Image: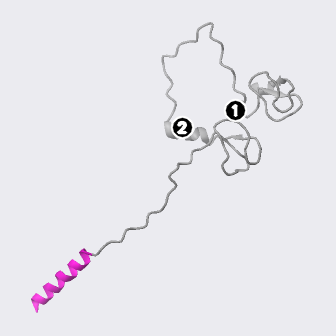
Amino acid sequence: MKTIKILLFFVLAISFSCKEEKPKPVLQENTQTASVKHYICANKCENSGSDVQGACPVCKNPYLHNDAFHSQDLLKNGPLNVPTNIQAPAANTPAAPSPAQNAKGIYHYSCTKGCYGGSGTASNCTNCGEPLAHNQVYHN
């Protein structure tokens, strides 16, 4: 009787330990990592957004600046490492041009006829062709 109990115990132990484990289903994850775009569409159109300023190819509205883009860089790369041995530019080196828009999204040069857009330099309006005028509000 004692041997039957021991034999039964081993049979049960072997049957549970040899039980075939079925593979668990693997959830399909998107292998493409979605990157945060620098400029985004206000309407959140599909396949829109860009690393450069422009217009949405779907709804043709101008892109908006995306502050989350800069937060992503900070989280990914950490604070900027500013070199300590910065040399002053040579006297004959021209100054770097100012950006087309300031942090508030105001253009440095804008159309006098009120067309959307502008530029960082005194050029002609891309919509109507009129010369762009200096926008003093850019500096405030």
Q: Which mark is residue 74?
A: 2
Residue under numbered circle 1: 103
What's the amino acid at mark 2?
Leu
Camera-nearest residue between 81 and 27: 27
Q: Position of residue 12 (x, y in %)?
A: 22, 82
As drawn, 15 above or below 115: below
Camera-nearest residue between 6 and 48: 48
Magenta stretch encompasses residue 115: no
Q: Residue furthest bottom?
A: 1
Q: Residue, x 78% and y 30% (percent of image)?
A: 118
Q: Work out whether residue 140 can be spotted.
A: no
Camera-nearest residue between 75 and 42: 42
Q: Position of residue 107 (x, y in %)?
A: 76, 29
Q: Position of residue 91 (x, y in %)?
A: 61, 7
What whole-number distance in Å separates the C-alpha atoms at marks 1 and 2?
17 Å
As drawn, 88 above or below 54: above
